[in-house]
Image (spheres, rainbow, N blue to C red):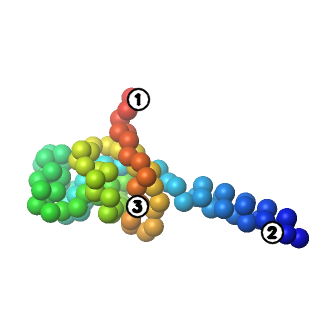
Amino acid sequence: MHRKLLMLVAAMLVFGCLSWAKTITGTVSDAMCGAKHDGDPVACTKKCEDGGSKLVVVANGKVYNTDQQDKLKGHEGAAVKVTGTVKGDAITITDVADASAGK
């Protein structure tokens, strides 16, 4: 009985952990502009960031917020692959990679 219960718990943990991590391919933008920029996306994102707007990831028309601004810095306006835990419109980032790498 205990062995079956232990196996069930282990299986739930393994499959649960696999479903939590998600990779999103999108563009680093700012919260003020989202997917729509006034001119050059890189310059616009940096200008809005300097003005206090937080960096976000835009993927498939959806804007993902994050508190981990340091992980997105240096990728302003760039295409990225972001891996992390998604809850609604927020992502807790574990990794950021250049999406154009390997092309």
The quadrant of the picture occupied by the C terminus is: top left
- Residue type of the residue flagged with mark 1: Gly
Left or right of residue 103, residue 75 in this image: left
Question: Crowdedness of circle 3 by 10 Å Cα count: few (<14), some, many (20+)?
Answer: many
Between label 1 and label 2, give the one nearer the viewer.
2
At x 45%, y 67%, the residue is 87
**Residue found at the very far top of the displayed protein:** 103
Between label 1 and label 3, give the one nearer the viewer.
3
Question: Crowdedness of circle 1 by 10 Å Cα count: few (<14), some, many (20+)?
Answer: few
The residue beneath circle 3 is 91
* Secondary element at tag 1: loop
The residue beneath circle 1 is 102
> N-terminal of the two: label 1 or label 2?
2
Per the model, the C-alpha gap separating discs 1 and 2 is 45 Å
- Residue type of the residue flagged with mark 3: Ile
At x 18%, y 52%, the residue is 45
x and y percentages locating residue 71 in the rendered image = 32, 51
The residue beneath circle 2 is 5
In the foreground, 29 or 3 = 3
Per the model, the C-alpha gap separating discs 1 and 3 is 25 Å
- Residue type of the residue flagged with mark 2: Leu
Does residue 25 appear in the picture of this structure? no
> N-terminal of the two: label 1 or label 3?
3
